[in-house]
Amino acid sequence: MRDETITGETVPVPESGYNFAYLDEGAKRMIRRAILKAVAVPGYQVPFASREMPMPYGWGTGGIQVTASILKPEDTLKVIDQGSDDTTNAVSIRRFFAKTAGVATTEKTEEANIIQTRHRIPEKPLSEDQIIVLQVPIPEPLRWLEPREVETRRMHALSDYGVMHVKLYEDISRHGRITTNYDYPVMVNGRHIMAPSPTPKFDNPKMGNMPALQLFGAGREKRIYAIPPHTEVKSLDFEDHPFSIQAWDEPCALCGAEEVFMDEVILDDQGGSMFVCSDSDFCQRRRDAGHKGPAVEGDDT
Amino acid sequence: MSELLRVENLTKSYGRQRGCTDVSFELWPGEVLAIVGESGSGKTTLLNCCAGRLAPTGGSVVYETRHKGLIDIHGMSEPERRFLMRTDWAFVHQNPRDGLRMNVSAGANVGERLMAVGARNYGNIRNAALDWLSRTEVDPDRIDDLPTTFSGGMQQRLQIARNLVSGPRLVFMDEPTGGLDVSVQARLLDMLRDLVDRLGLSAVVVTHDLAVARMLSTRLMVMQQGRVVETGLTDRVLDDPQHAYTQLLVSSVLQP
Amino acid sequence: MYVAVKGGEKAIDNAHRLLAEDRRGNPDVPELTIDQIREQLKLSIDRVMTEGSLYDRDLAALAIKQARGDLIEAIFLIRAYRTTLPRFGYSQPVETSDMVLDRRISATFKDLPGGQVLGPTFDYTHRLLDFMLAAEGKEIDAPETVETDTDETPRVLEILARNGLMEPPDGIETDGRSEAEKADVGDLTRDPLSFPTNRDLRLQNLARGDEGFLLAMGYSTQRGYGRNHPFAGEIRFGTVSVEFVPEELGFPIEIGEIEMTECDMVNAFAGSAEAAPQFTRGYGLTFGHCERKAMSMALVDRALRSKELGEPADAPAQDEEFVLSHSDNIQATGFVEHLKLPHYVDFQSELAMVRRMRAEFFGEDDDASTAEAAE
């Protein structure tokens, strides 16, 4: 937002100078066409004419453009980064939409009908009335094996995916297991191999047959892709080395939750640490409901 | 029985330059055809056109597929052709670096074709790789090593293992012993001949080395300036060359 | 007692206040005006306009002020503003042959019609700090001004082309595209770049590309990584008029004048199967006076044509996907700097894996803080 004119005279903040949700309607239509195509071909990366946004590339410009294109004035938006509503970039993006679109925002997963996220899917299962928008830095799952766009496009077109298992084979032969822990490649609808964005592999099973529409936006790389509701998403693996997800031995120190993705919080410089839910809303709501983890048990303040 | 490969009036030109002109031949199951000639004679261009790696300017290459009978490989769709190339066919490059993934282990190199067609059991893939490494005389203990740590001869044997693991029927080879020392060449040739015999492979081998042709092939085609000047059973052509160019080649190279 | 990290909003607000304070610097020193920046930091303005791909001197000056002199940040501001502007249409191609010249040099011919015009250039200055400038208020000797007649200053490459020694302006016909296809110029701000590209989109990408990146890429071709034997056929800087055809009128009207720098590199070409030996060109064009950028762009443009001309293409500067995917400094700076964003989740995944593998390495089986469970 410019709040100064060229001569330095201060004028009221000109939100009204921009269209609803910042993007002009032409750009939104273009992006919505790309989204429709992405939904029609699950997992396929649709090139789109990514606009230059007032945030840096790599900071969620793809997700922001997708959200801006589907946002309606009556929507309620939740923005998370690393599972948390309160990390700086989540705050910055939420403010951007509150300012340019004036939509309601929330931290409560079930209150939002659009959730923009970076690197996590909420622990609370999403419903058919919700859309989750994931920010994607590198949309091409084959990029680390083949840097050339011309070649990766051909590989997708021909389902020439042998090389993906070559990578997994190498992991197992070197380390005894598949060592990919996030951005773990998936096969969508039995046809396209897709990067789930740098979400931990813990979240991969949530993507399969999810009732909510999942949209993926990569602004710098100019790609949009989608997983329609109730679509099969399979994490690549071998029969004798099946896909597995992370699990923690201890429950969340604050709310006692188990079988959720945890952040490790360093407590001192002696190596002391504890594990807490990465999903801050999920954790807070459990604590509000009276659940307690080991770190707060008996602490009634 | 029908022929495995039928090449008719194949021509490939690059602008004003001719790669190969009006070449026709058939290859029968179990047969090894050698194409000889000096560099620039068009033999590698011909090989690439036959193997579907280069689109010809004219003529056709017809292959007897397992399920659909004779099909013009240049009329196939790209996915069909790719599938054929990684299952029924093999291509051995002169420089093993062109045919290997240098940044993944020997085992992954051998296993790739299996994974590409849907093999999803790590243990089975690894066992197949071990088996093919030993069949191509690569120490199975080297299965997890990168090809960059292999000698030239070992890389070439690894490339052959990587190609043969899918049980191809037809192998294209471009100067398979080209970059190797003489002693290493002899061992590789022995191994190749043995594999071809035992597996009943058909092959098209391009070489400038008449000794390689003599050792591997049943039939021989001599090329000069993009055209076939003489063709026949290998022993007949080498022992009793008819065309002046073949006579020149034989007299300048072979010392009986 | 542990308190979850909170306060992102407050932190951001305060960071913005600190930024504003830092931008202003010592309030006892008079504040820079937009006019001063526009008039006295011309080459910064020109770079911001070129790489921001928006010709507006006042906005560029404002962006430089707001960005505290960080030109890439200023370019970013301009780009983000530009993207919101409505498109009325496309101007007619500017005719640089009709440029009112401030500078025009050729390294290929000693003398040529219209002569060599040095104009404002650092080229023959001695790079000695001028302490008189620090003292302010230095008097300037008024330069002589010469009027050039555009009829008498044909472009050097046109002279070569008349003799058939130079390829036609839109390249040698080897890419199999029809005239109509070539005339259909793409717009990479409206359609995503897809590979392989054509020269129109390559030139657009290079025109917006980072000066430093193109400089290094162009330099690498001179040092043998994709050598293409360049000569500076002509570099010209001056003013051209911009024409636009409003639909209502149906004929072009002049809508303004802009300053531009153009560089034509002349490169030897040995000929191919289809094309006779002749000179080829690498082309560079920028807003304002960005000579280094225009020259670098021309070198890289020519390097990227090697495939079309049937030359070996194995150097970095000849690799279209490599050059075009990494030339944009706004994309590059965003992605490099996004490493500042939290990556707790990805890092936690790696941490758990490394701990577990270390435990195995040291022969402890169940001691790791996390274990993997079957899905």
Image: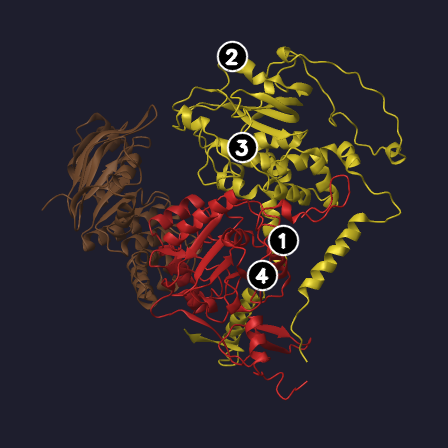
Q: Residue C203, which numbered label?
A: 3
Left or right of A49: which side holds C288? right
- Observer-nearest residue: B64 or A278? A278
Residue B143 position (above or below residue C298): below
Chain of the residue where label 2 is placed in the rendered structure: C
Q: Which residue is mark 4?
A: A104
* Disc nearer the start of the sequence (2/1): 2
User: In this orientation, which residue lies closer to the viewer: C13 or C249?
Assistant: C249
| Circle 1: element type | helix
| Residues marked 3 and 1 touching at CB (< 8 Å) | no
Disc 1 is attached to a residue of which chain?
Answer: C
Count of numbered marks: 4
Q: CA distance from mark 3 to mark 2?
A: 25 Å
Q: CA distance from mark 3 to mark 4?
A: 44 Å
Foreground mark, 4 or 2? 4
Distance Cα–Cα, label 4 vs label 1: 30 Å
- The brown-tinted chain is B
Observer able to see residue C128:
yes
Pointer 2: residues within 10 angstroms few (<14), some, or many (20+)?
Answer: few
